Image (tube, helix red, strand yellow):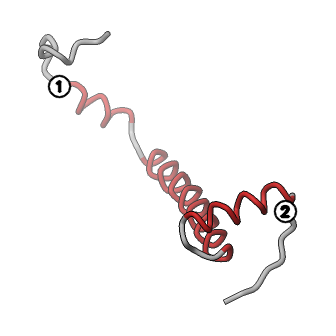
Amino acid sequence: MTAITIRLPNSVHQKIKELAARDDVSVNQFIASAASEKMASVLTLDFLKAEAAKGKRSDFDHYLGMVPDIPAQPGDERV
């Protein structure tokens, strides 16, 4: 495990302490969890962009063409 030092505005540090106490975790656990959530968000976006880049418009058009051209069922109409 690695220890780091970060500088936070006093107001942010105070709010982190309050939220950590509310979740019954330490400030370290709270910050580690927040960093992990941000990392997961960025990595997910990277993954989705990479997957989207592999897509082909012709495949999209093919499968979209398989959708029947019928009226929407009651309750599913565009508002």
Q: Quadrant of the C terminus?
A: top left
Marks 1, 2: nearer the viewer: 2
Query: Looking at the image, which is closer to me, 50 or 35?
Result: 35
Residue type beneath disc 2: Leu
In the picture, measured across the screen, residue 38 lies left or right of residue 74, that is right
Q: Quadrant of the N terminus?
A: bottom right
The picture places residue 76, in percent across and down from the top left corner, at 20, 18
- Which dot marks residue 8? 2
- Residue at image x 52%, y 48%? 49
Q: How many C-alpha atoms fall within 10 Å of the one at disc 1: few (<14), some, or many (≥20)?
A: few
- Residue furthest to the bottom in view is 1
Mark 1 residue element: loop
Task: Name the N-terminal-most of marks 1 and 2.
Answer: 2
Per the model, the C-alpha gap separating discs 1 and 2 is: 53 Å
Query: Looking at the image, which is closer to me, 2 or 61?
Result: 2
- Residue at image x 21%, y 24%? 65
Mark 2 residue element: loop
- Residue at image x 30%, y 37%? 59
- Which dot marks residue 67? 1
- The quarter of the picture where residue 29 lies is bottom right
In the picture, measured across the screen, residue 74 lies left or right of residue 14, that is left
- Residue at image x 62%, y 67%? 20
Residue type beneath disc 1: Val
